[in-house]
Image: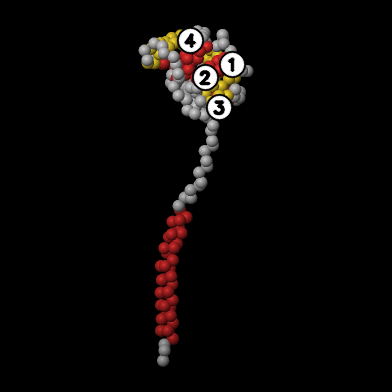
């Protein structure tokens, strides 16, 4: 005669074993699901906006000369510069440092290293314009704060080359902005923009491009 208690105990052991086997087989799947949920999903990268800036600028095609000199007057500070910045095939370090100070941010007094290629552009431009007048500098180096203030008036780029010491806004008392723009464009040495209302020409050592 079969003992009912023994039969019930046997069935209980069988069910318990089956449940344990099922639980063990499910553990890897649960672990894999948890691991997969913790892996960060990569968002598709947004394409960078296209910028039509033209070809890179090259060196300024300056005519042979033992020395190169410039005359400048900074409109916002009244400071003047008159000196030789190039001698016997080399830039004059002391003169470049002096120019960095003269062309500082006029609002804060902050100084940066200006790109000497700007001086070569001005020097060759004055040769082609056949003038010895001082360049009137309307704007040179700008800090981000000064550039932001200028942007409120309009016509100023957010990432202007002025921020990097690579741009000057200039004019001459004895030559028109149209004539200055023409010779600057002819250099093919950087960016050139004419601002007739403000009566100055922007030059920079960035990619070759023209506006205004």
Residues marked 3 and 4 touching at CB (< 8 Å)? no
- Between tags 3 and 2, which lies in front? 2
> What distance separates the C-alpha of mark 1 from that of mark 2?
12 Å
Judge by depth and name the residue closer to the eye, 67 or 148. 67
> What distance separates the C-alpha of mark 1 from that of mark 3?
22 Å
Q: Which residue is mark 2?
A: 186
Q: Residues within 10 Å of mark 1 (few under 14, many from 20)?
A: some
Residue 72 location (% of width, % of height): 49, 11
- Between tags 3 and 4, which lies in front? 4
Q: Residue at x 48, y 22 (%)?
A: 189
Q: Which of the 4 quarters of the picture holds residue 193?
A: top right
- Between tags 4 and 1, which lies in front? 1
> What distance separates the C-alpha of mark 3 from that of mark 2?
23 Å
Judge by depth and name the residue closer to the eye, 136 or 117. 117
Residues marked 4 and 1 touching at CB (< 8 Å)? no
SS state under label 1: helix
SS state under label 2: helix
Left or right of 97 on screen, residue 154: right
SS state under label 3: loop
Name the N-terminal-most of marks 2 and 4: 4
Q: Which mark, by number, is residue 178? A: 1
Q: Which residue is mark 3?
A: 157
Q: Which residue is mark 4?
A: 71
* Residue 90 visible: yes
Residue 63 location (% of width, % of height): 44, 14
> What distance separates the C-alpha of mark 4 from that of mark 1?
21 Å
């Amino acid at each position: 005669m079969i003992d009912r208690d023994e039969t019930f105990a046997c069935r209980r052991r069988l069910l318990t074993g089956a449940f344990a086997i099922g639980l063990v087989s499910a553990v890897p799947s649960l672990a894999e699901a948890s691991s997969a949920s913790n892996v960060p999903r990569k968002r598709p990268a947004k394409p960078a906006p296209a910028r039509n800036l033209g070809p890179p600028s090259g060196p300024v095609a300056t005519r042979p000369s033992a020395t190169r000199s410039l005359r400048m007057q900074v409109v916002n500070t009244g400071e003047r510069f008159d000196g030789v910045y190039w001698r016997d095939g080399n830039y004059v370090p002391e003169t470049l440092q002096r120019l960095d100070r003269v062309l500082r941010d006029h609002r804060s007094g902050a100084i940066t290293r200006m790109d000497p290629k700007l001086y070569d552009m001005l020097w060759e431009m004055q040769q082609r314009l056949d003038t010895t007048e001082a360049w009137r500098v309307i704007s040179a180096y700008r800090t981000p704060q000064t550039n932001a203030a200028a942007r409120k008036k309009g016509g100023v780029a957010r990432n202007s080359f002025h921020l990097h010491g690579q741009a000057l806004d200039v004019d001459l008392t004895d030559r028109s902005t149209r004539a200055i723009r023409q010779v600057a464009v002819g250099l093919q040495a950087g960016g050139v923009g004419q601002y007739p209302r403000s009566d100055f020409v922007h030059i920079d050592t960035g990619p070759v491009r023209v506006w205004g």
